Image: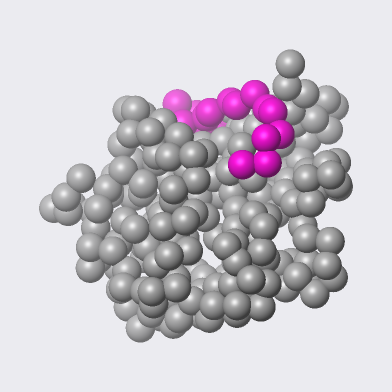
């Protein structure tokens, strides 16, 4: 039986939930999933049963509750050293931590204008000069990681850094962002992971529609 419980939001929309969920699935760390649909039926009170911060994701390990996606990933890396969720090589680990912190703290223009919505296709929507600058920075991060550590993932083997950037790959697909060939290959590689396909399938089966994440007139 799984000893962990991961509390997440809607798979269609919750980019922060996707990060530790993907990490655990791809690394074969078993867990039970609790899904709290966001912004309806007192979702905030439901989430506060698990975390006073009132946000998902939350990881529950016995009496311990860990919130904040990056802190959850770090906790799992400490609990499962054999999984090398961060690489052993110091240079790759430092790069991974830096780009994960950059993702966690930044890219507000991209996040605000190209909200995650894995059920829809919105080509051409949401592009601004600020979004373009965020995308350019992300492509530079990916290029350096893939070149320096040899691929196929950002630090070589799949790691926390890939989990942190996974929602961005869905945004690039949803909004049909034009990328370099190498970046597009990375997007395709991430989206082809079986857990990512499972996430998309589960999102497609969700019935909640949150207008704040939907663009009127765009195609499904
Ligand atoms: N910095 C947090 C962000 C968490 C977050 O904003 N989660 C959203 C869903 S993606 C949420 O719980 N929203 C519900 C609310 O704000 O009431 C993390 O990394 O986990």
Asked where in the image residue 53 lies, by quadrant, the reply is top right
The residue sitting at 77% across, 23% down in the picture is 3
Report the residue at 47% width, 56% height from top: 189
Q: Residue furthest left?
A: 217
Residue at 41% x, 31% y is: 202
Judge whether 175 appears above or below 12 on screen.
below
Q: How many marks?
A: 0
Q: Looking at the image, can residue 55 be seen?
A: no
Residue at left offset 57%, top offset 36% = 8
The C terminus lies in quadrant: top left
Residue 193: where, in percent of width, then height? 49, 45
Give the quadrant of residue 83.
top right
The image position of residue 142, as x and y in percent, is: 55, 73
Give above or below for 174 relative to 29. Answer: below
**Relative side of 206 to 46, left or right:** left
124 or 160: nearer the eye?
160
Question: Residue at the top extreme?
Answer: 1
In the image, the segment drawn in magenta is: 26-45
Q: Is residue 122 magenta?
A: no
The foreground one among 85 and 8 is 85
Q: Quadrant of residue 205?
A: top left
Q: Is residue 82 above or below residue 100?
A: above
> Which quadrant is the N terminus positioned in?
top right
What colouring style does the render use?
one colour
Task: State the image coordinates of residue 114 (x, y, percent, origin top left).
Answer: 36, 62
The answer to whether residue 26 is left or right of residue 190 is: right
- Residue 150 appearing in the image: yes
Find out whether residue 38 is within the magenta segment.
yes
203 and 215: which is toward the camera = 203
- Where is residue 180 drawn, in percent x and y? 39, 77
Q: Is residue 188 left or right of residue 75?
A: left
């Amino acid at each position: 039986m799984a000893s962990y419980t991961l509390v997440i939001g809607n798979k269609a929309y919750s980019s922060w939930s996707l990060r530790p969920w993907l990490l655990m699935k791809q690394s074969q760390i078993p867990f039970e999933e609790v899904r709290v649909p966001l912004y309806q039926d007192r979702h905030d009170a439901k989430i506060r049963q698990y975390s006073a911060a009132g946000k998902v994701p939350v990881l529950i390990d016995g009496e311990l509750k860990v919130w904040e996606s990056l802190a959850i990933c770090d906790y799992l890396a400490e609990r499962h050293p054999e999984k090398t969720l961060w690489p052993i090589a110091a240079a790759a680990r430092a790069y991974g931590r830096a780009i994960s912190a950059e993702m966690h703290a930044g890219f507000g223009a991209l996040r605000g204008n190209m909200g995650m919505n894995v059920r829809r296709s919105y080509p051409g929507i949401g592009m601004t000069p600020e979004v373009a600058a965020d995308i350019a920075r992300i492509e530079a991060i990916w290029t350096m990681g893939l070149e320096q550590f040899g691929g196929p993932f950002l630090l070589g083997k799949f790691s926390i850094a890939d989990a942190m950037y996974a929602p961005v790959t869905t945004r690039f697909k949803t909004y049909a962002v034009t990328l370099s060939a190498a970046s597009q290959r990375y997007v395709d590689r991430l989206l082809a992971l079986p857990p990512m396909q499972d996430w998309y399938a589960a999102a497609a089966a969700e019935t909640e529609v949150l207008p704040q994440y939907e663009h009127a007139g765009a195609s499904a």
